[in-house]
Structure formats: C-alpha cells, structure tokens
Image (cartoon, rainbow, N blue to C red):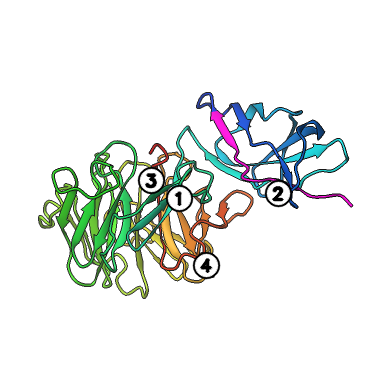
Amino acid sequence: MKRIIAWIATVFCVLFTNNSFASSRTISWDPVTTYTDGTSVESWKIVTYKIYIGTALGIYDIIIDAGTANSVIVPNFPDGMVTHVTAKAFLNTGEESAYSPEYLKLIGNGLNFSLGVYVKGVWYLEKNTNFKWDGAGQDNIVADFGKGLTGATGITGDWNGSGTSQIGVFYPPNLWYLDYNDTRKYEAPPADRFYHFGFPGVVSVVGDWNGDGRTKIGVYDNNGAWHLDWNGNGQWDGPSIDRYYPNFGKGVAGAIPVAGDWTGSGKWRVGIYANGLWYLDIDGNGAWDPAIDRHYPNFIKVTPNAVPITGDWEGTGLTQIGIYSAGVWYLDLDGNGAWNPAVDLMVPDFGKGVSGAIPVTGIWNTW
C-alpha cells in the first residue's frame, strides 16, 4: 500500500524580474520531507518535482518538470491575471504526492493588492498577497488600532498620499482615527489624524473625491444623503467647498454605500449596493442618471450576508466591484459587473469563521 506524501508548511515564492506583461519569474518551494504518517521521505528518493501553473482553480496550462531542485525559472509567466501555482513530488518508489496547497497571485501592471479583515480592534492583513492567512510570521496582525471602540468600523485608504494604504477606524456617529504616519498604532495629532465628521445614523465611506492622490472621509445616511470631505481637512465646510449629494440611494431599502474610481479619471465617485444590485455614479454628479450611470444586477446576487467591497484589483487605475460573504471573496476582475468564474477571482477562505469580520483591501504588502 502506497503511503501519502505530505506537504508540510509548503511555501511558494514568486520572484519578479520586471513588470512586463509576460516575463521571467522564479518560483521556489519548500521540499517534501515526510509522509502523512510522520515518517521521513529521504531526499534521495525524490525523482522530480512538477510545477503546475494555470489561470483557474484546478486547470493548469503550464506544467514544468523541475527535477530535484527547489526552484525553477518560468520564462513566460502569465502576468496580468490571477495565477494559480501548485506542485507534485514524485519518488523512485512510484509514489507521488497529491497537489500541494495552491499559491494564488494576482499580478497586473506591477501592482498588487492585499486582503484583510478587521475584528473589534484587531486587524488581520495579508502581507505576501497569496490570498490566504499564513499566520503572524508571514502576514500582519495589528492588535490594538480601534480596540475598545465598540461598534467601530475598520477603514483603509491612502491618507497621506504615499501610494500605499494605511488603516483607520470610524467610531459612530462622528469620530475618525486615521493612521496617517503608517505605524499601525494610534498616535495623537499631528502624527496621526483625528476628525469629527458625521452625525447620528450615518455610516462611513472613503475615497479620493478630488483626485489629489489622498483618500478623504465621508458619510452616508439611510435617506440617500452623502456628505463628502472634498478638501480633506476632516471637517464639514458646507456644500460650496465640500460635496453634498441629497438623493443617491434615496428610497432604496437596505442600500450600502460604496465608492471608487469607476472611470479611471483619478476622482472617486459614489455608488450603492442593495440586495445584489449595484448603482454606480459614472458621471460624478451625485445623482442617478439611468442613461449615463451604471447598474449591475447580477454579480453574485444570491450570496447571503453579502458585504460589498471595491478595489483596483488588476492595477489598471479602474475600481472594480466585489463581494465578501462569511470569509469568501468574489472579485470582478474583468470589470463587467457580472460573475464569470473562468475570469474572475473567488478566494475561499480569508476571514472564514471569524464572527463580525469587516473586510478591507489595500496595498500594504510593503509593510
């Protein structure tokens, strides 16, 4: 009876040599050392590792025989899309392993994003962009930014214009704590930012409203009204300076505010998600114009307890939509507002089993 070879703490690493669309990549991995029953696999028994690369779960277009080495150069790595990497080990006894755990990487124009969740003051942020939680050694835990603020919402944005993402919390009805200096701990101003902006019954929304490269704050109430801090000073200066939209979402039951750069202009616009339906303000006037604006009716419509998320998933400068539901992420990579499993990305387990997790995304893999 053949024993099963175990992949114990297998770690893939993809090294980047340039940012061209299809370029050379070096893939390295941990060697197999044991069977699943705990007995050792002697290194001399290993005949070869085979590396499998594809753009869909379980479908591998590239198969490389790597011999007994623990790394291999892939000359035409399929950049600009989600890439799945896995491996098998083959022994001279005729035994072979199952596929290793998949390494998942999104590579687009040299820009990556990362996932995270916020739970009662604790942040779990992936660092190595493989779309799974690998523990504090490889990913990041921020233990006390927002701790003790019951009911606070975790938010992320580029508060300081550095090109990366920082964390923050909104504590209803009107308190904002922003990690401006990116130390992942709150420090009194001027190191960090503390704002009073909001009123009872609102929820937070953030975006680069004026296109200057810095994320600003805003609030949305359940009557469809938006107050956006256009000039970024953290206070409401009235609609002549800031922006007030009275009715984008008015009358839509269960509407949740979203924001993004829907057109690639550099300026973020508003939108709402309600019961599987998306309404995006394409022209940026803060009013629903059915002939101009965008309506997506069928992106993972029936997912229970769905939380809308947005981000520039492929580094194109355009914001795409997504859904988080109980630890499962669905991301619209092609930006057409419809779920296509052959093209789009489903991350099966980041935050699963964590009660009350609030999904966040950002570019903090440089931490």
Q: Is residue 281 above or below residue 210?
A: below
The residue that label 1 is drawn on is 115
Q: Nearer the viewer, mark 4 or mark 1?
A: 1
Residue found at x 19% / y 61%: 175
The residue that label 2 is drawn on is 58
The residue that label 3 is drawn on is 263
The disc labelled 2 sits on which kind of residue? Gly
Secondary structure under the numbered disc 2 in the rendered image: loop
Q: Earlier in the sequence, mark 4 or mark 1?
A: 1
The residue that label 4 is drawn on is 301
Q: Quadrant of residue 44?
A: top right
- Residue 352 locus on image (x, y percent): 51, 62
Q: Are marks 3 and 2 in contact (CB under 8 Å)?
A: no
Disc 1 packing (10 Å; few <14; some 14–19; many ≥20)? many
Is 6 covered by the magenta stretch? yes
Q: Earlier in the sequence, mark 1 or mark 3?
A: 1
The disc labelled 3 sits on which kind of residue? Thr
| C-alpha span from label 4 to label 1 | 22 Å
| C-alpha span from label 2 to label 1 | 22 Å
Residue 177 badge: none
Q: Which residues are magenta?
A: 1-15
The disc labelled 1 sits on which kind of residue? Leu
Disc 4 packing (10 Å; few <14; some 14–19; many ≥20)? some
> How many badges with numbers are in the image?
4
Q: Nearer the viewer, mark 2 or mark 4?
A: 2
Along the viewing direction, whichever of 340 and 25 lies nearer the viewer: 25
Q: Nearer the viewer, mark 1 or mark 3?
A: 1
- Residue 42 locus on image (x, y percent): 77, 36
Locate residue 30 relative to residue 247 in the image: left or right: right
Secondary structure under the numbered disc 1 in the rendered image: strand
